Amino acid sequence: MTQDIRKGILTKVYLVYLGVLLFGLAILGRAFYIQNFEKKDMLEMAKKQEMQIFPIEAVRGNILSDDGTLLAVSVPIFELRMDLLADSLTDEVFKNNVDSLAICLAGLYKDRSPMQVRDKLWEARRNQERYFLIKRDVNYPELKKIRRFPIFKRGKYKGGLIVIPQWERELPYKSLARRIIGYEKGEADKKVYVGLEGKFTKELEGVGGSRMMRRVGGSNWMPVDIESQVEPQNGLDIVTTIDIELQDMAEAALRRELIADSADHGCLIVMEVKTGYVKTMVNLGRTKKGTYEEVFNYAIAEANEPGSTFKLASFLVALDDGKVELNTPIQVGNGIVYFAGHKIQDSHPPTASVYTAQQVFEKSSNAGTAKMIYANYSADPQKYIDGLYRLGLNRPLNLQIDGERPPYIKNTKSKYWSDLSLPWIAYGYEVALAPIHLITLYNAIANKGKVVKPLFVKEILKNGVAVKTFKPVVLNPQVVSPSTVEKAMILMEGVVLRGTGTSIASPIYRIAGKTGTAQLAQDNRGYNQGTRNVRYKGSFCGFFPVDDPRYSMMVVIVDPKKGKYYGGAVAAPVFREISDRLYAMQKDIIFPARKDTLNSPLPFAHTGWQSDLQEAYSALGYSTGKVNIKATWTQVISADSKIVLYPQLISRNLMPDVSGMGLRDALFLLEQMGLNVSANGKGSVVAQSVKPGTLVNKGMPVVLELQGPKAKEKKQI
């Protein structure tokens, strides 16, 4: 081999080596450049194709009423997307069906024209989008229709339709009992629940699942493999103590009174005596529009001075300590007494200068109550405070619902204690209690001294089977002595029979309770701001029937503006309307038999229009006592040589009790409500196909069974 040839070969080898070296250096240089100058951009590109695990929200459990009626439920809504590159979605299939699909989508939602929808679908096809948004917030009926549309009816893999289920909370009864049931508030990433939704959110929310998702551009993510996702475990259901029919009726009654009084707000609580189950709790406040809605849970979260309903606590302490008896004389004078230079005055002048302790309570004498407590406890005021503490009035109830405002009763060591504190606390001032605290005390007297905790939830269910049951909770088995309980019962029934609550006395069943009227402080400006600015709170708290207490109830009306503000005038009538309805709904309570046979000289009449009955009895020379002069429909009760027209309460959405009515009156009443009525037989109504108190709708069929009286058995008009 010649030297020239060898030299040429070596040159070529060197060139190859040099090329490899330069190539390697170029790679290293490029790597160095990427690492130091393009790293951020490359990472962003990588993120566009990254895969992540996303959580799947579990279906939130339902909230049910005491009879299983849905109060809050999670309903499915869907987000629909489309994979324009689905394997079986060929150009031919897409081209032949896209116009029809556009027409169907445009016809269903009417937010865009078919041409606009078609252009969007073609654009997504050209851009090879695999997660194109079709529609958000699609309900199930709409989804069923969409699945029958062209292309989509081919199925998930052949038609490219991607269905993403989501859940939305719905209250079937809308605002009814909204403050108890609760709701979601706040932004999506900071949402919180209030009411039972909040207190039991751990049980309701269940356990979430997960799925793998791949970014398909921007902020859009597409499921990678639906089959491999971890399914969520749905939440548990909770069964409340709430009677939804009673809730509806109670809300209507409270709203009517608030409107009539032009009041600021009000609340109402009904509780089962023996169990502590809260059957209804209504909270209505005036909105800016002038309507009344559930805007705040006043029943548990508004703690202020209760006024005269607190006098029960003072009497319980004095009776249990042996300081007074029911017949203990108390000087009330002219109803005005001074303590530490401040006047305490009765709302009405007393009828005598000396009352018994029982009369002080029945007449709700502020001066008498203050003098009674001051005379017995001024030497040791802490003993009186300790007595209130024994009643549990200084301790929160730790309810099954958030928002309870702790009660406040100061003791003698407080820096705010003054010479005026003892007499003022005696009749309900310088203390702060929420309605739920007061009704718990009154309920204890109805329950023979046993204090039970108010409960809102009875059970927690999993797939319809109870996994946890909340039994009645006894907070104190005997809060005061049995003899004190008996005396308290006499005091409270006396209020209704002879005292400030006589307007709601019933000839059918016995009610015990206490009226309350409190002047509300004006922030830090005190109480007396002139007659135009004075604000009052009227309340009534009690239970019924006295001989076998079933329910305790408290009604509060705050800042009425139509001239009446006493608890007996604004709150007690609402109490009576609800108690009448509840009493009538008790299947095991028998109404007193009418004394209208041949042994009674009083003529009998069917239930009917009050004015007609009054006119008929007047023509026969009989006077009639009216329980409620505003009542339209009345039932005749004849007893003790007297005729009483007892009101039949009629609600526009609740089935009335038409038993005892003649066919004409029953037809008139029910057809006015829009019901479809048919009748069998002759005479008066003895049975009806729809139970009294049932929620009714227009057009609902009702069958009445009629029967005529036996000959010579009744004198009728």
Image (cartoon, helix red, strand yellow):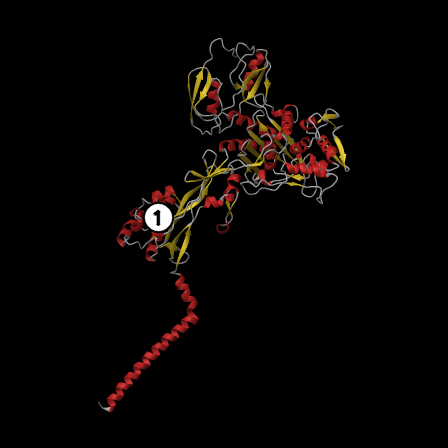
Up-down relation of residue 674 to residue 90 (above or below):
above
Residue at 34 percent across and 51 percent down: it is 227
Percent position of residue 474, x then y: 56, 36
Up-down relation of residue 491 to residue 14 (above or below):
above
**SS assignment at label 1:** helix
**Image quadrant where residue 442 sits:** top right
Please identify the residue farthest to the right as the structure is shown: 341
Tell me if I can see residue 620 in this picture.
Answer: yes
Q: Residues within 10 Å of mark 1 (few under 14, many from 20)?
A: some
* Between 97 and 341, the one nearer to me in the picture: 341
Percent position of residue 351, x then y: 72, 24
Count of residue discs: 1
Percent position of residue 651, x then y: 51, 28
Amino acid under disc 1: Pro
Please identify the residue farthest to the bottom as the structure is shown: 3
The answer to whether 535 appears left or right of 706 in the picture is right
Residue at 49 percent across and 33 percent down: it is 244
Up-down relation of residue 362 to residue 171 (above or below):
above
The answer to whether 335 appears left or right of 244 in the picture is right
Please identify the residue farthest to the top as the structure is shown: 712
Percent position of residue 313, x then y: 65, 33
Quadrant, the N terminus: bottom left
The residue that mark 1 highlights is: 114
Tell me if I can see residue 262 in this picture.
Answer: no
Please identify the residue farthest to the left as the structure is shown: 1
Residue at 27 percent across and 88 percent down: it is 7
Residue at 55 percent across and 34 percent down: it is 276
